[in-house]
Image (tube, rainbow, N blue to C red):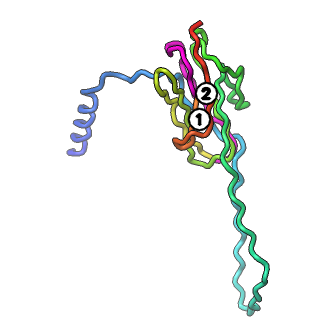
Amino acid sequence: MLLAGYLFLQRADADSGAIGPSASIVVGVPGGGVVTPSPSPTLAPSPSPSLAPTPTPTPLATPTPAPTPQEAFTAEVKACRSISVAEAECIDEISRLRDRDETFVALVLFDNAVAGDVMNAILDGPSGPIEGGPFALEGGGRGYYYSTFAIGSLPDGQYTLTALRNGEPVASTELRKNDD
C-alpha cells in the first residue's frame, strides 16, 4: 500500500512541472539493422575421457601464430531524399538542403559492427546540434542506420551530418542549406 502511494506521488510530482514535449526536428522513429551478421565463433568438441594412458607430447620449437585482430569498424553517412530500407540504399543523395524538401534521411552504412553498438546521427549547423535518435543493434556485422530530419525551419548556412557509434564520430559529410 505504501509503495502504491509513493509511486502515485512520484507520478504526480513528475506531471506537475511538465510544460509539454520538447521541440525537435527529428521526424519518425530511427531504425536500422544488420544485413550480414558476423560469423559466430564455433567451439571444438571436448575430448571424451579415457582410461588408457595418454603419451605426453614433446614440445615443438615452432612458434604459435599471433591471433588475427578483429576487422576494423567502418562507416559512411549520406543525406538522402529517401531510402530503400529493403535494399539499405540511398535514393537521390543530396548535398544541399532546400526548404521545399521539408525532410531528408540520414543513412549510415557500416561494416564490422558488434551487437549492442548504439548508432546515431547528428546534424550540426547554425542552429546547433540536433540528434537523430539512438538505435541499438541487435546483431553484429554489416548493416545500416537511418533517421529522418525536418529541414524547413532550419536557418540557411553550412551543416555537418555526423554518424556516431557508441557516441563517437565515425563518419561525416558536409551539407549546405539555401532558402530557395
- Pick the quarter of the image with the N terminus: top left
Q: Which residue is mark 2?
A: 106
- Discs 1, 2 touching: Cβ within 8 Å: yes
Question: In this orientation, which residue lies closer to the viewer: 139 or 112?
Answer: 112
Point out the frontmost of discs 1 and 2: 1
Residue 167 x, y percent position in the rendering: 51, 41
- Seen from the viewer's position, the closer of residues 102 and 87 is 102
Q: Residue type at mark 2?
A: Ala
Can you tell which quarter of the image residue 29 is in? top right
Q: Is residue 172 left or right of residue 125?
A: right
Up-down: is 69 above or below 48? above
Dot 2 crowding, Cα within 10 Å, few <14, some 14–19, many 20+: many
Q: Residue at x 56, y 30 (%)?
A: 30
Q: Residue at x 49, y 13 (%)?
A: 153
Q: Quadrant of residue 105?
A: top right
Q: Residue 97 or 16: which is nearer the viewer?
A: 97
Q: Position of residue 8 (x, y in %)?
A: 25, 36
How many residues crowd mark 1 within 10 Å: few (<14), some (14–19), many (20+)?
many
Total number of numbered discs in the rendering: 2
Magenta residues, dominant SS class: strand
Q: In this figure, which residue is indicated by the disc labeled 1?
A: 163
Q: Is residue 152 magenta?
A: yes
Mark pair 1, 2: CA separation:
9 Å
For label 1, the SS is strand
| Residue appearing at x 26%, y 40% in the figure | 7
Place of residue 99 in the rendered image (x, y in percent of width and height, measured from the top left): 57, 10
Identity, as a three-letter code, of the amino acid under mark 1:
Ala
For the residue pair 136 and 90, the one nearer the viewer reads as 90
Q: Residue at x 22, y 41 (%)?
A: 6
Range shown magenta: 140-160
Q: Which mark is residue 10?
A: none
